[in-house]
Image: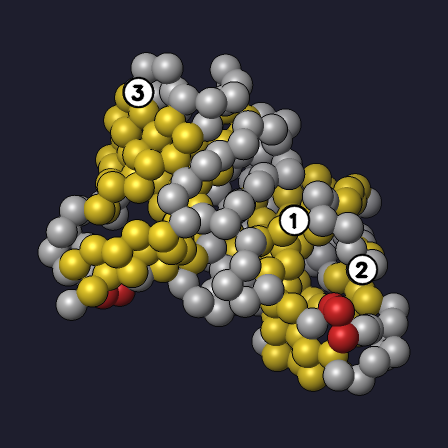
Amino acid sequence: EADIYQTPRYLVIGTGKKITLECSQTMGHDKMYWYQQDPGMELHLIHYSYGVNSTEKGDLSSESTVSRIRTEHFPLTLESARPSHTSQYLCASSEGLSYNEQFFGPGTRLTVL
Amino acid sequence: LAKTTQPISMDSYEGQEVNITCSHNNIATNDYITWYQQFPSQGPRFIIQGYKTKVTNEVASLFIPADRKSSTLSLPRVSLSDTAVYYCLVGGSGTYKYIFGTGTRLKVLA
């Protein structure tokens, strides 16, 4: 059983608000990822991290930002939420070689009104 | 990054064996082939991974021909609970930007 957690699971918020989606893992994995997925659509990588203080943007351009100050924690922040940010956000982690298994969290379903 | 191509959807009946084939013509020498399963409103879950020939675990088998330009995920005797989206990914060491693509939407019918 993978120990990767995301909070909140569901969030409904008004336009212009700042939000932070939390992701934590207790497996000591060095690599962490954020994906964005609309219902029934592709999973898109928006951020990833090799380790502490290392973050990179993924393939899908996103207005969100991430930080990796601690190994176990990889929060995602939206400074000013917009309806176009409505989506499911999935966090994942992996260890060792980059093609190793990624463990996914349960996701946060964000709705911006 | 090696691009993968899979059927968009498949239907099967309970108890049948399901084979989902993925094409990856540009696979690199150090690339591995990995399959994930995703249920609605959940994150993907790792099923199986292989480099060449055949790999089998408790839930699936993965067949990879010698040229490695394709792979086939085999699910023996599917049940209704196997209804999900199945993704084929290709990548090796140094590949961080995995492309999940649209996957194959498998529907198992009673």
Q: Residue at x 39, y 20 (%)?
A: B68
Q: Residue at x 72, y 44 (%)?
A: A58
Q: Chain of mark 3?
A: B
Mark 2 packing: few (<14 Cα in 10 Å), some, or many (20+)? Answer: some
Q: Give left or right: position of B25 versus A44.
A: left
Q: Is residue A90 visible?
A: no
Please name the residue that numbered disc 2 is placed on: A64
Which amino acid type corresponds to the residue marked 3 in the rendered image? Pro
Nearer to us in this view, A66 or A16: A16
Q: CA distance from mark 1 to mark 3?
A: 29 Å
Please name the residue that numbered disc 3 is placed on: B65
Kind of element beneath mark 1: strand
Quarter holding the C terminus of chain A is bottom right
Q: Residue at x 35, y 30 (%)?
A: B71
Q: Specify whether disc 2 shares its chain with disc 3.
A: no
Q: Specify whether disc 1 shares its chain with disc 3.
A: no
Please name the residue that numbered disc 1 is placed on: A45
Q: Chain of mark 1?
A: A
**Residue A49 position in % (x across, y down):** 71, 44
Which amino acid type corresponds to the residue marked 1 in the rendered image? Leu
